[in-house]
Image: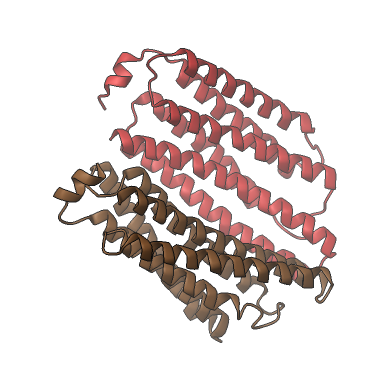
Amino acid sequence: MFSLQRLLSRDDVFFDLMEGSAQEARAAIQSLVALLRDGDEKPKLEAFTAARRKEKRLAQELSEKLCKTFVTPLDREDIEAISHALYKIPKTAEKFGERYLLSGIELHGVDLSRHVELLDSAAEVIVLIVRELRKGLELKRVKAHNDELQRIEGEGDKLMLESLYQLYASRCDPFQAMLMKDLLEMLEKIFDRCRDVGNIIFHIVLKHA
Amino acid sequence: MGLIASLFVREDRFATLLESASLEVLATVKALDQLLTSPNPAISLASFVQARAKEQEIKGQIDVLLCQRAASRLDHGDIVALALGLNRISKAVRRFAERHMLCASQVPSGIFAVQIPMLDEAALTLQRMVVGLRGGISIAVAKRDNDQLQRIKGEADKLFTAAVVRLYQGHHEPMVSIMLRDLYEILDRIFDRARNTGNHILQIMLKLS
């Protein structure tokens, strides 16, 4: 798609930084997947913190670059919105990791394996959809990625309800149920954050269509 | 754009779609009412699924029109924000319904009997305000409608506080208290979103006047 803005701006650094952020979001989700999948070999909280810190550093670098650059490949507010949305993914993943490790909670028959699979897929789609920004905002491809993120989020919502149902039916200790519910809600929030990235990028593409 | 567009736009398709979205909010609230009173939840669930499909269709049409830069007396930013606001109300209502279905057998029946008619009133008021965006009603009428939404929200807040106090006093089993607290919070969020959307509509009308 032709855009004068993109023609005048030859700076690929913005795309590099946004793609870096997407990779860090994926790294944070992968730490979370490892935490939930390999129950015995729990990664330390540092893995989450490292991803979040890297993400923050990239966001700051992007913000500085925006201040110093006259012509940007996309609108400034759009770049900032993407960066902000991407930063929220490792932040929420870290929060989940903290809470999970600190509470030492047992899962009370709630199966999180499908959540883990979906999170993994969402992280991959995030990387792909952010890469599309560099390739020229192709509406069809971005829409396909965004639809996939919406589908994953919808599945995540269904899983959340199923897990809550299992929890209510398990008649476990109310205190444990409260902790578990908090964790499930945080997982749901991670799905929401991934969906938000998709929505933002899709709207940017629509604007340029 | 607003003033010039209002001179040339013979058919504001955005306004029509926003009206449809507000009708879907109303339909979702009616479906919730039916779910809480009807002995057959499967029928009510079908209404939610139908409303959801309609909403997705409306959202898709708004996206296409935005992409085509269709003319409207409303700013495109306002259209996106309003569509999102209305969508978030329906989403929260559906969320409440789903959660309620999970624990319907455990929470006391009729516990939300006061709040649901208030929700219905809020949805009706909002729908009137959205119709008013076409320019058929005066600012005074819109302000009166918005005041009504604020009043409903104020009353809902009072009910929420009283309900939480009852939960803290231990009137229910701990597990039931957890479920009820969740439901009350979602309900509170629905009233918040209705109030926010009302405020937004009034601001748009003031801007257009």
Give residue B112's position: percent from left, percent from top: 63, 77
Query: Between A120 and B87, which is closer to the camera in this rendering?
Result: B87
Q: Position of residue B24 (x, y in %)?
A: 39, 67
Q: Is residue B61 left or right of residue B129?
A: left
Residue nearest the viewer, comparing B105 with A57: A57
Q: Is residue B87 left or right of residue B92?
A: left
Task: Give the camera-side residue of B30 and A96.
Answer: B30
Total numbered circles: 0
> What is the drawing colour of chain A?
red
Asked if residue A39 can be seen in this view, the reply is no
The hue used for chain B is brown
Q: Is residue B17 visible?
A: yes
Residue at x 30% of width, y 64% of height? B137
Q: Can you say whether B59 is above or below B23 in the image?
A: above
Residue shown at 59% from the left, 32% from the top: A87
Vertical comparison of B1 with B204: above or below: above
Q: Is residue B24 above or below residue A79?
A: below
Q: Quadrant of residue A25?
A: top right
